[in-house]
């Protein structure tokens, strides 16, 4: 959706592909004569100390050419952004912005194919992508990343810096030391990078009678919201044409995307007037998003699969169906990503992702790490299941939808 000149996303998770490092600053600040820089009509800040440090480093640092002026500006901006303590508020360089846009369009990338996020300040794997080198090598959801090649990951490291270290050309290798969720000893995993592409959603028909519509939604983004909605419409029309009454939806590893895409899809399962979600701004104003379409999939038996890799718009979707009593949720607790970022386009192709809204569930509670989506039926795939290729969550969902 659009908000204050920028697209509002819920994506915190960064796919480890060929990102390029560095942050660029695009805010318009006007200097005044006394060393104070004016931000707007009501705020000002004295930055003499900043220039004092800048000048001392420029004059006295032993390796004069090691850091360019551009690098110093980027570093200063990184410090400014980090001071907010919000991992979802970030600056992206023009190249990073292009990579982000390409990712949402499903284009090819070179990398390991894993989505990274934060957990209590540590960098974790939210989910390896299906068919990715990361998944094939044994990377699992919830893995803590302890080191990348010879670099030891530290608390407070910027996720983009870690992405930059992991990224690389297809055919090259990267060595990760990770701690699997629930285990005590870390393991070292070498991964050969490859080409990555992920469709936003796929539809198949499963079960002995092929009477279950299985929708695997990888993300709630495409090149545009309209494109994503059109793809969803095609899925709904196909299900309607097959006249099936059971719908199984897989949101595991789905990092989210457009808030409006989650609303659009959830609307098809709900009666007119039912609350899908709410948004709260910084002043406490709340806007409600209610079902308006009449529900093209209303009355179907619905089961939704989630895990700790389900975040943002996927949680909005799952929470709406769960709290309105139209779906059974199966799996493990979700990520808890309940804020929206406005994407502001800046000069030279850079962008600013800034947190502007909180997302509320239909009952009015704030979706966050302490209040994520708890499945109605909790099923966890064990390490042994992962190794053997057994999906207990999917199998349980099939049992439930056929009852």
Image: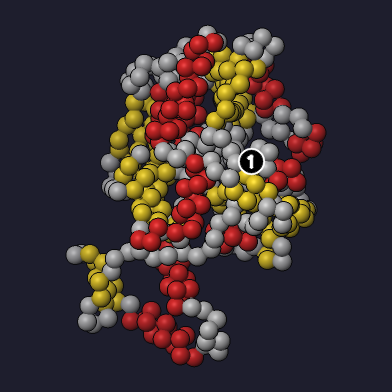
The answer, for residue 37, to whether it is visible in the render is yes
Vertical relation: 338 (above or below) 305 = below
Q: Quadrant of residue 50?
A: bottom left
Asked whether residue 83 is in view, the answer is no
Image coordinates of residue 293 in percent, x first then y, are 35, 19
Q: Which residue was labeled with disc 1?
A: 129
In this picture, residue 224 sits left or right of residue 369 = left
Name the residue rendered at 68%, 22% in the picture: 396
Task: Identify the residue at image location x=48%, y=35%.
Answer: 220
Question: Is the N terminus in the top left, top right, bottom left or bottom right quadrant?
Answer: top left
Query: Between 148 and 357, which is closer to the camera in this rendering?
Result: 148
Rendered image coloring scheme: secondary structure
Please state the horizontal and vertical placement of residue 150, each as a whole percent of the image.
72, 66
Out of 224 and 123, give the one closest to the viewer.
224
**How many labels, in total?**
1
Question: Who's the residue at 76% across and 54% down the image?
Answer: 190
Q: Picture coordinates of residue 48 (x, y %)?
A: 33, 81
| Figure check: 108 above or below 161 | above
Quadrant for residue 381, please give it.
top right
Residue closest to the far left: 41
Tag 1: Cα neighbours inside 10 Å, few (<14), some, or many (≥20)? many
Q: Secondary structure at mark 1?
A: loop
Q: Quadrant of the C terminus?
A: top right
Using residue 161 as the reference point, say whether residue 5 is left or right of it. left
User: Residue 153 placed where, x, y %?
Assistant: 64, 62
- Residue at left offset 38%, top offset 61%: 348
């Amino acid at each position: 959706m659009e908000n204050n000149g920028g697209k509002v996303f819920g994506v915190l998770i960064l796919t480890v592909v060929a990102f390029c490092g560095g942050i660029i600053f695009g805010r318009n600040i006007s200097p005044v004569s006394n060393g104070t820089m004016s931000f707007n009509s009501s705020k000002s800040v004295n930055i003499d100390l900043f220039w004092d440090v800048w000048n001392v480093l420029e004059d006295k640092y032993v390796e004069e050419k090691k850091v360019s002026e551009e690098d110093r500006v980027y570093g200063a901006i990184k410090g400014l952004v980090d001071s907010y303590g919000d991992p979802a508020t970030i600056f992206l360089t023009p190249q990073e912005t292009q990579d982000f846009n390409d990712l949402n369009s499903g284009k090819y990338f070179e990398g390991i194919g894993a989505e990274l996020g934060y957990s209590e300040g540590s960098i974790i794997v939210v989910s390896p992508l299906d068919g990715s080198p990361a998944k094939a090598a044994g990377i699992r959801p919830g893995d803590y990343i302890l080191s990348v090649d010879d670099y030891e990951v530290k608390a407070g490291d910027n996720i983009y810096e870690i992405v930059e270290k992991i990224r690389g050309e297809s055919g090259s290798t990267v060595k990760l030391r990770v701690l699997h969720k629930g285990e005590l000893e870390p393991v070292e995993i070498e991964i050969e990078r490859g080409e990555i592409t992920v469709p936003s959603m796929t539809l198949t028909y499963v079960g002995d009678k092929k009477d279950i519509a299985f929708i695997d939604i990888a993300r709630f983004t495409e090149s545009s919201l309209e494109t994503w909605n059109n793809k969803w419409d095609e899925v709904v029309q196909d299900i309607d044409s097959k006249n099936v009454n059971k719908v199984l939806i897989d949101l595991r590893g789905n990092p989210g995307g457009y808030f409006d895409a989650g609303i659009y899809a959830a609307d098809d399962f709900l009666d007119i007037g039912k609350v899908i979600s709410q948004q709260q701004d910084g002043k406490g104003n709340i806007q409600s998003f209610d079902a308006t379409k009449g529900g093209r999939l209303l009355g179907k038996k619905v089961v939704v699969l989630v895990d700790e890799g389900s975040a943002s718009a996927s949680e909005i979707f799952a929470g709406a169906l769960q709290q309105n009593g139209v779906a059974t949720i199966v799996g493990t607790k979700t990520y808890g990503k309940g804020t929206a970022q406005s994407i502001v386009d800046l000069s030279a192709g850079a962008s600013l992702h800034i947190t502007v809204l909180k997302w509320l569930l239909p009952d009015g509670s704030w979706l966050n790490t302490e209040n994520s989506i708890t499945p109605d039926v909790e099923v966890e795939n064990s390490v042994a299941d992962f190794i053997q290729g057994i999906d207990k969550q999917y199998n349980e969902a099939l049992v439930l939808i056929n009852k």
